[in-house]
Amino acid sequence: MKFLLCFSHLSWNFVYQRPQHLMTRFSKHYQVFYFEEPKHGDSDKYIINVQDGVYIIELILSEFGEQANSKIQDLISAILAEYEITSYVSWYYTPMALQFTNHLNPVTVVYDSMDELSAFRFAPPQLLQMEEELFKKADVVFTGGNSLYLAKKNRHHNIHAMPSSIDKAHFGKARNMQHEPEDQKSIGFPRLGFFGVVDERFDIELLREVSAKRPEWQFVIIGPVVKIDPNDLPQAHNIHYLGSKNYTELPQYIANWDIALILFALNESTEFISPTKTPEYLAAGKPVISTAINDVVNPYGNAGLVEIVDSGDSFISAAAKIFAETDKDHWLRTVDHFLEDDSWDNTFNKMNALIEKATVKKVQISSAEKQIKYV
């Protein structure tokens, strides 16, 4: 049995995204333990739940202080002892996990840099320093998009762009679904929808402007509101905040939208993001309007698959163009051809091959060093 220990800043049940897609696929080849960020509780303990073949680990501490990292190390060591884990891959989504995993001795270290976390609101001040340390430890590094790869490609000898992909079959259901979710049923048309985390990246002012200028258009916003004050979000009769939805439910909502939106402001927290929702919207067969996020402009905007806007007026013009389009068949064929080889299975296969190659190389180097030592 091969083991993989994944240390993440995201709770497994927060939003189903890159870590979940990848870890569920790795769980078919490894026994995967997904460690969430430690949280406060009534005692020092760990709780293990199994979902989709992945062991989800809640690390709970009674108090956070000088001894916190040492206590977390003890909990991790106890899990390794309980499951008799001696040889394993360590996979990092957050460099901050190095604070309580330096005692580990993994066969291979993987850093999947899915976002530029240091640019996010409330990022720990020591994050960049910890990331530099992780780059030194990592045997292979992946980035969540091409912009992030270009920004970090000179920081590691074995770094690869692995943009987030899609489950085409899942989102493709939206093309033929008739069922209308109860909380969306009463909303009028046309509908322009967004799903994802509503945080400091969300373009509040663009939504405010367009919804005011086009009161007959209905804006559906799906997802949790985090790190920003919900009271700062625009409120209007044609803006509908439906809250979080399960990943399995998303096609039902998208199926009844006229346009899908990538409503991200252009700021330091969005400079390197590669929104997973871009190909997901397209797989659902929905026209997409996006702000000028680098990894959306290239390749989707340049390929004519997504309308790129830079103001409220250009947004309105793009939407009007989409509404006036009577023949979507050619566009859909172009979309399907573009997404033909895009899948999480393909992304997993590429990543797994690179991890295995890095592992073999590391073992060979270690063996050679031992031979030299004893000559």
Image (tube, rainbow, N blue to C red):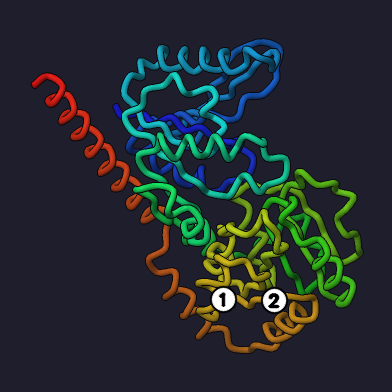
Residue 102 percent coordinates (x, y): 46, 23
Q: Quadrant of residue 317?
A: bottom right
Q: Residue at x 29, y 47 (%)?
A: 353
Q: Quadrant of the N terminus?
A: top left
Q: Secondary structure at mark 1?
A: helix
Q: Which mark is residue 126?
A: none
Say how many tags the image has: 2
Tag 2–tag 1 contact (CB < 8 Å): no
Cα–Cα span, label 2 and label 1: 10 Å
Let me know if residue 176 appears in the view.
no
Residue 72 lies, with reference to residue 336, above or below; the image says: above
Where residue 98 sits: x, y (%)?
A: 51, 28
Q: In the figure, is residue 67 to the left or right of 49?
A: right
Between residue 122 and residue 341, name the one nearer to us: 122
Q: Position of residue 111 (x, y in %)?
A: 45, 41
Asked whether the viewer can see residue 352, the reply is yes
Residue beneath disc 1: 301
Q: Is residue 17 above or below residue 286?
A: above
Q: Amino acid at mark 1?
A: Gly
* Mark linked to residue 309: 2
Residue at image location 80% in from the left, 76% down from the top = 312
